[in-house]
Image (cartoon, helix red, strand yellow):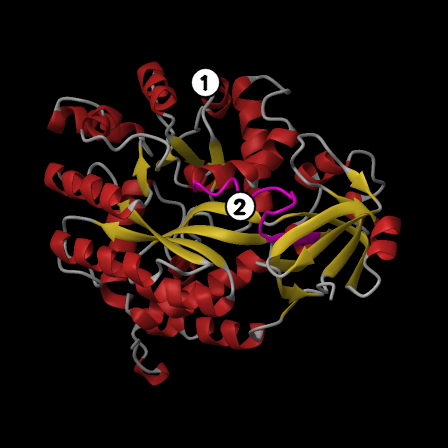
Amino acid sequence: MAVRGTLLLPQFLLPVRPAGTVLEHHALRMVGDRIDALLPAEDALVRFPEDLQVALPRHVLMPGMINLHTHSPMTLLRGVADDLPLAQWLQDHIWPAEQRLVTAQFVADGTRLAMLEMLLSGTTCFNEQYFFPEVIAREARAFGMRASVGVPIINVATPWADGLQACLARAEALMETVADDPLVDACLSPHAPYTVDDHALQEVAALAVAGQVQISMHVLETAAERVQHEQTHGMGPLARLQRFGLLGPDFLAVHMVHPDAEDMQRLADTGTQLAHCPKSNLKLASGICPLPQLLAAGLNVGVGTDGAASNNRLDLLEEVRTAALLAKGSSGDATAVDAWQALDMVTINGARALGKETQLGSLEVGKIADLAALELQAAATQPLHQLHSQLIYSASSSQFSDVWVAGERLLKDRQLTRFHADQLLAEAALWPARFRGDASVGPSL
């Protein structure tokens, strides 16, 4: 007996691979959680007459986007401290707020709000770094989103763990918990070179090898970081990380705003992955990442939103548009980071950075069906001349209407299928009062 699948019938398919391809009036067939076929729509209707059909007549169907760096629970700190430089924002406002507020409930509510925002804007997978990662993993699984959940590694006590050894023990526990999870995996997230000592780096390197997991870390986010690091350690941050064997294809360097020529060569030689977070870097006045030079060096660069407390949105389409425009303006080269490259950065490049390029990031037979459909019948995307260009430079994330993760339709006609958005928004709305210490709303549990 033939297996019944699902036929998605969009106006356009944007498969990402082969590069530069746009397919009109084609169908994508899903069976279970996998892409089973890409073929002309007329042929699909003849070959698979028993399949469930999903008409998307005014849509482009593309791979779900991959947010390569975020701090999901920090949606609840959105707007708490704006118009400040990184050090002042972090040390005087965010860290004190986290010491007061961060609990398992804070993390759960903030993560759900973040996933709502990401799913509504076409993101299907996110690379996370925050306290209570076991809670984030649980919430992602319940929501149906794909997540690589980073376990924070830091030398100081936090609301989640009282120091390095507690962080490492909880990392091992989470790695074991998600070992066979089809949606959620674990990685190690030492905070930054300036908050993690040599012993911690040794422990991270050993645990990553033993557990065969990836590492992500904030690196060279500000110019001051290099100066301080050289004064303290006698070398730059990347040289120190390489000394401990951390750089390589399984290491994701986040931000990389201030690399010098030697750093870029070191990154290229080791095949280190990069996450570019342009809006956060701009808002905190951290600087402008030299994206064209990094790409010219052959580095794989994906895009992350960073947290909503410093962005202040988790809109990946807007983020990559900013990345492309910033690359052009800062380099004086209008051809820098064209629309095809920008599309790659939020799809296949993100998948490659997470070690998932054989499973995600493009619409190819055998890959997992993480998909997003964007409605083109909108003022900003008409008339339609070049699909890829208008997606990157013109479309709004509010035009995403339907999203699938592992073949499951999590967003249908802009409505969640597993949760009620109103409930998630109501939970989030309680947090400003808690931030102010209003006991009438109840404590954070």
Q: Is residue 118 left or right of residue 52?
A: left
For the N terminus, the image quarter is: bottom right
Q: Hey, what amino acid is under mark 1?
A: Ala
Label 1, residues with CA under 10 Å away: few <14, some 14-19, many ≥20: some
Label 2, residues with CA under 10 Å away: few <14, some 14-19, many ≥20: some
Q: Is residue 375 left or right of residue 154?
A: right
Residue 335 pos. (x, y %) = 64, 20
Q: Residue at x 12, y 36 (%)?
A: 198
Q: Is residue 375 left or right of residue 346?
A: right
Magenta stretch contains residue 343: no
In the structure shown, which secondary structural element does the residue marked by tag 2 occupy? loop
Taking the image as drawn, is residue 93 in sight? no
Q: Nearer the viewer, residue 131 or 381?
A: 131
* Residue that label 1 marks: 297
Residue 92 pos. (x, y %) = 25, 51
| Chain part drawn in magenta | 354-373
> Is the stretch drawn in magenta largely helix, strand or loop?
loop
Report how far apart the C-alphas of labels 2 and 1 lie in the structure.
26 Å
